[in-house]
Image (cartoon, rainbow, N blue to C red):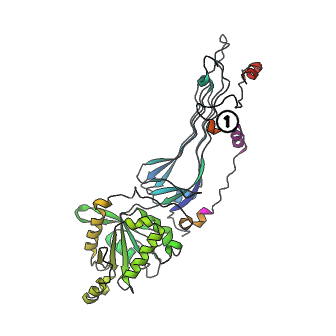
Amino acid sequence: MADSNFIDYVKILCRSGKGGAGSRHFYRAKYVPKGGPDGGDGGRGGHIILKGNRNMWTLLPLKYRRHIFAGNGESGSGGRSFGKDGDDVVVEVPCGTVVFDAESGEYLCEVTEDGQEVKLLRGGRGGLGNWHFKSATNRTPRYAQPGEPSIEKSVVLELKMLADVGLVGFPNAGKSTLLSAVSAAEPKIADYPFTTMEPQLGIVSYRDNRSFVMADIPGIIEGASEGRGLGLRFLRHIERNAVLLFMVPADADDIETQYRILLSELEQFNPQLMDKPRVLAISKSDMLDDELRDEIARTVPQELPSVFISAVTGQGITELKDLLWRAITDENNRGDGSDAVHRPLDARHRVREEDEFIFQYEPGENEEEEDEDLQSISPDTWGEDIDWDDAEFEYGDNADDSDSRASR
């Protein structure tokens, strides 16, 4: 998997911009010795924004862009001049990207539509200049608000493909062969397990110029929910599917047992998958005669619709499409996956090489000095209830020292 361009799990460090400080300036002119306060407000810090892009199919660009920092807002100046806002950073991601907190595993947001923008981290507000604090009893306020600090967070981005039908089955059950037969997709097909190493999407044509999207994931084996095989890493892609198509080969020892194993693995991975409609397809049915087919039909689970198919001869493909289309267009199953409830990240759903990634970032000297300056006023005191008597402020160059001491 190291050489694959398909990346569906990335851990990155994001930081929004901090707000600029308000100005403590006083107006001075030749014939205006006491012009009063006219310090402007600081600029807003930049936001971190996620934007959906339908032309992207992988998180590969973010794998080599581990640190995403927005611009800081500039400080205000005299003449009620506002500081410049920090530059926003727009990160384009594929549709179907879900964001989790890397520390707690909590679900944060998701991007499901092309052009959709989600504000991941908000930039800090700029501080108010001293002209906001003038009043009849305080005509020379020699203080201004500092800007709000930035927000820094490590997040995990998971890509979950948007598809109508998800193929679920053991290795070599005929999933890739079916996808290649009903769509223009060209997945790798071979006679050894785990031929499919990454998810594949295909558009299946239906009657009256209608179509739906089918997704093929690597084969699932018993114990996949505990980390065995490749199924655990890619099971996330079927969380958005409207219908699950279980595929069991006709030459299996016990079709119902294999179906129950697959169902159990999905339930252990995410119990909400049990609420999705299910269809069972017995593949490789071209090897069966009528008598053997009738015998196998009596052992198939009766609680879900089933069909015998053969991707090589085309047997049962039309009937399978009809079953899938009815399930997709069912009134109780019209969601597009955007309303899916995502399970939080836990130890079983993590990718070790991503979680062990160490962010080697150290702020520069100037950034450390600015952070120390902002410690003079706690962010908790931001707003109208600031206790300005207890806060420490720096005074402008034009302020008189005696007035400064008096104002303290």
Instruction: Name the quarter where the C terminus is drawn.
Output: top right
Dot 1: within a 10 Å radius of its alpha carbon, few (fewer than 14), some, or many (20 or more) residues?
many
Q: Secondary structure at mark 1?
A: loop
Instruction: Name the quarter where the N terminus is drawn.
Output: bottom right
Compared with residue 313, is residue 187 higher up or lower down, i.e. above or below?
A: above
Camera-side residue of 167 and 259: 259
Percent across and percent down for residue 369 are: 72, 40
- Say whether residue 301 is visible: yes
Magenta span contains residue 372: yes
- Say whether residue 188 is visible: no
Residue farthest top in this picture:
31
Left or right for 344, reference 166: right
Residue depicted at 28% across the width and 59% down the height? 331
Magenta span contains residue 267: no
Left or right for 6, reference 255: right
Residue labelled with disc 1: 377
Camera-side residue of 54 and 264: 264
Give the quadrant of residue 251. Answer: bottom left
Residue depicted at 34% across the width and 82% down the height? 284
Residue farthest left in this picture:
208
Compared with residue 100, is residue 151 higher up or lower down, i.e. above or below?
A: above
Percent across and percent down for residue 218 are: 45, 73
Percent across and percent down for residue 34 are: 66, 14
Compared with residue 408, is residue 167 higher up or lower down, i.e. above or below?
A: below
The residue segment tinted magenta is: 355-376
Give the quadrant of residue 28. Answer: top right
Residue type (three-letter) at the residue carrying disc 1: Ile
Left or right for 1, reference 286: right
Camera-side residue of 186 and 384: 384
Percent across and percent down for residue 316 are: 27, 77
Camera-side residue of 205 and 76: 76
